[in-house]
Amino acid sequence: MEMIFCQACGDSMSPAARACPKCGHPNQTLVASEPGVVSFSPPKSRIVAGILALLIGGLGVHKFYLGKIGLGVLYLVFFWTFVPAIIAFIEGIIYLVQSDEEFARNQGVNVRPS
């Protein structure tokens, strides 16, 4: 039986599997044009999101990075009030102290408990 390797954890899995049975990372070898296959974006880094939130989060850059376009626009609209900057600073600290699994879970990525 032909096997492929998960790009996230390196464990072997079937080429027909939708996700890695060990870590739950989506199978990137599936073609998005196949019926019933949902396309996905690669997981985002909590470190990058945290640093973006701390440095330029008042403009909503970290929200755009995480794919939350609506919230990013909202941050942009109200950046002059400095309220988004305060919220982004707090979010940046939260992103940096969270574990990778907790960050992925909060961002809507399915992770399997260890």
Image (cartoon, rainbow, N blue to C red):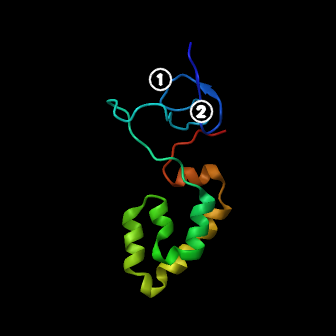
Mark 2 residue element: loop
Image quarter for residue 54?
bottom right
In the picture, the disc for residue 16 is: 1
- Describe residue 95's horizontal placement relative to residue 36 as left or right: right
Packing grade of label 1 (10 A; few <14, some 14-19, many >=20) is: few
Between 63 and 28, the residue placed more toward the observer is 28
Identify which residue is drawn at 44% across, 58% down: 67
Tell me if residue 9 comes above or below residue 97 in the rendering. Answer: above
In the rendered structure, which amino acid carries the disc numbered 1?
A: Ala
Between 28 and 107, the residue placed more toward the observer is 28
Between 20 and 106, the residue placed more toward the observer is 20
Tell me if residue 12 comes above or below residue 41 in the rendering. Answer: above
Between 30 and 66, the residue placed more toward the observer is 30
Q: Position of residue 58 (x, y in %)?
A: 50, 78
Tell me if residue 71 comes above or below residue 11 in the rendering. Answer: below
Q: Position of residue 31 (x, y in %)?
A: 40, 32
Mark 1 residue element: loop
User: Which of pointers 1 and 2 lies earlier in the amino acid sequence?
Assistant: 2
Q: Position of residue 86 (x, y in %)?
A: 54, 80
The residue indicated by pointer 2 is: 6
